[in-house]
Image (cartoon, rainbow, N blue to C red):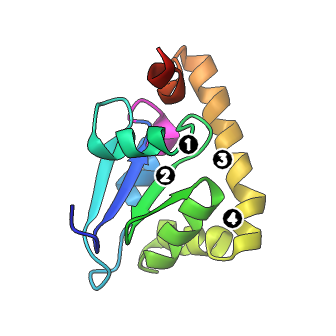
Amino acid sequence: MDKDDIWLVYDGECPVCKSYCKYIRIRDAVGRLHLIDARQPSEVLDEITAAGLDIDQGMVVKFNNTLYYGADAIQILTLLSTRFGIFNRINYLFFSSKAGAKLFYPLGKAIRTLLLKVLGIKYIDNLKQKND
């Protein structure tokens, strides 16, 4: 893994997560963005699980060998993103500050939880799998 690259671990079955990943654009100068589906085995998911981070309760971004979780993940990703396009401008408006990320991230998480229930999609349960 190149330490300058960005690793975004998301739920590949969640419509909100997939849409977010489809539209987020990272600045070229920052590095490459790697999208990792948390429903598939990966080295990064193993690292997240070992750190005790519940992927069902928050997205994870790995950047410069640091794991960012939940609101911190969306904020760092926003700060590394371009401002081009309506999606990225709105994303920057809501998530570029620590206060904005802490305020609005739980709303996105609640929408994800509701969607998963409505669509009958099970949680990933990465921490439970570790303990089995």
Mark 2 Cα within 10 Å, few/some/many (few <14, many 20+)?
Answer: many
Q: CA distance from mark 4 to mark 3?
A: 10 Å
Seen as rendered, the residue at the extreme left is: 1
- Report the front residue among 5 and 87: 5
Q: Which mark is residue 108?
A: 3
Identify the element where label 2 is drawn.
strand
Question: Which stretch is magenta?
Answer: 12-17
Q: Mark 1 or 4, which is nearer the eye?
A: 1
Identify the element where label 4 is drawn.
helix
Q: CA distance from mark 2 to mark 3?
A: 14 Å
Labelled pair 1, 4 in contact (Cβ < 8 Å): no
Q: CA distance from mark 4 to mark 2?
A: 14 Å
In this rendering, position of residue 33 left or right of residue 51: left
| Residue corresponding to mark 1 | 53
Mark 4 Cα within 10 Å, few/some/many (few <14, many 20+)?
Answer: many
Identify the element where label 3 is drawn.
helix
In this rendering, position of residue 12 left or right of residue 1: right
Labelled pair 1, 2 in contact (Cβ < 8 Å): yes
Of the residues under marks 4 and 2, which one precedes in the sequence?
A: 2
Q: CA distance from mark 3 to mark 1?
A: 18 Å
Q: Residue type at mark 2: give it.
A: Val
Q: Mark 3 or 1, which is nearer the eye?
A: 1
Labelled pair 3, 1 in contact (Cβ < 8 Å): no
Of the residues under marks 2 and 3, which one precedes in the sequence?
A: 2
Identify the element where label 1 is drawn.
loop
**Residue 42 higher or lower than 100, as above or below:** above
Place of residue 97 in the rendered image (x, y in percent of width and height, measured from the top left):
68, 76
| Residue corresponding to mark 4 | 101
Q: Residue type at mark 1: give it.
A: Leu
Q: Mark 1 or 2, which is nearer the eye?
A: 1
Place of residue 121 in the rendered image (x, y in percent of width and height, measured from the top left):
51, 18
